[in-house]
Amino acid sequence: MMESKSLFKLLLFSLFVLSFSPLHAQTKLYEFESAYVKKTTTTSGSSIEVVTTEEIFITDYGKKSASYKTEKRNIKMLKKTEESSSVHIMDGEWIITYNPKTKEGTKMKNVLADKFKNMSEKDAEKMVKVMKEALKTETKELGSETVSGKKCKVTLATSNIAGMKTTAKVWTYKNFLMKSESESLGNKVKEEVAVFKEGEKVDKNKFMVPKDVKIKEVKY
């Protein structure tokens, strides 16, 4: 389940990236400076259902973001429910993840940020083309719909890798993913923003790792 779930997330991320055509190489990830977001994601499979709620704090046009997550897992076969929490911070240079209960976490260099920052628009368009061909992906614009009070662009993306079909319908506002519905490998994922406050002033402490948390650097 975990391997297929990880692959599924990778495919969904790829389809989300491919929904932007052309993909602009720029330092601004989103077309708004700051925001507070509350989102729920539900992943459903034959043996497990995972519900993730998260509060997201965004500043500097997406260069910096902090996500505070709570995940509840309903393991159907065992009739068991588990819960965990995590914090994910991206400050431009580093990607930091830690468990607020165990007080342990990791950090690694955000190599993708530098790659996209220095990429020309021509190279970005070439990368999108290569990804589409590799994933055998087709995208279709479906107009616009409103999510959490924001008018969003709706895109349908489908891919087929080794006979494995993945479909993803995404709603985006100023390049931010407001809602998605996707299916692959017998799993269904639905995520949707319930609260979106654009221009919200973000507390700097949200991007700070508590002093009692031990962070280990991971190198690639």
Image (cartoon, rainbow, N blue to C red):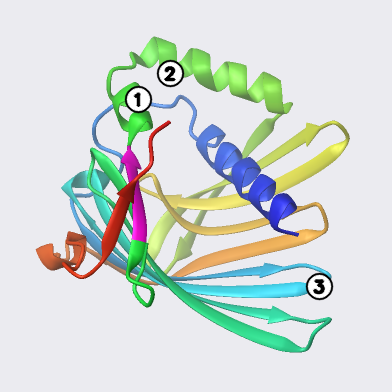
* Labelled pair 1, 2 in contact (Cβ < 8 Å): yes
Please state which of residues 84 and 170 is positioned toward the viewer in this rendering. 84
For label 3, the SS is loop
Report x, y in % for residue 196.
Answer: 32, 68
For label 2, the SS is helix
Please state which of residues 81 and 169 is positioned toward the viewer in this rendering. 81
Q: Is residue 9 left or right of residue 121?
A: right
At x 88%, y 35%, the residue is 163
Q: Residue furthest right?
A: 163
- Specify whether residue 46 is in view: yes
Q: Mark 3 to mark 2: distance in Å?
A: 39 Å
Q: Residue tagged by mark 1?
A: 116
Crowding at dot 3, Cα within 10 Å, few <14 / some 14-19 / many 20+, comes out as few
At x 15%, y 65%, the residue is 202
Please state which of residues 11 and 210 is positioned toward the viewer in this rendering. 210
Tell which circle, 3 or 2, labels the residue nearer the N-terminal end: 3
Closer mark to the observer between disc 3 and disc 2: 3
Magenta highlight range: 105-109
Amino acid, disc 2: Ala
Amino acid, disc 1: Phe
Residue 209 higher or lower than 124, as above or below: below
Quadrant showing the N terminus: bottom right
Report x, y in % for residue 124.
Answer: 43, 18
- Specify whether residue 203 is in view: no
Quadrant showing the C terminus: top left
Tell which circle, 1 or 3, labels the residue nearer the N-terminal end: 3
Crowding at dot 2, Cα within 10 Å, few <14 / some 14-19 / many 20+, comes out as some
Q: Which mark is residue 124?
A: 2
Q: Residue tagged by mark 3?
A: 47
Membership of 106 in magenta stretch: yes
Report x, y in % for residue 68.
Answer: 35, 69
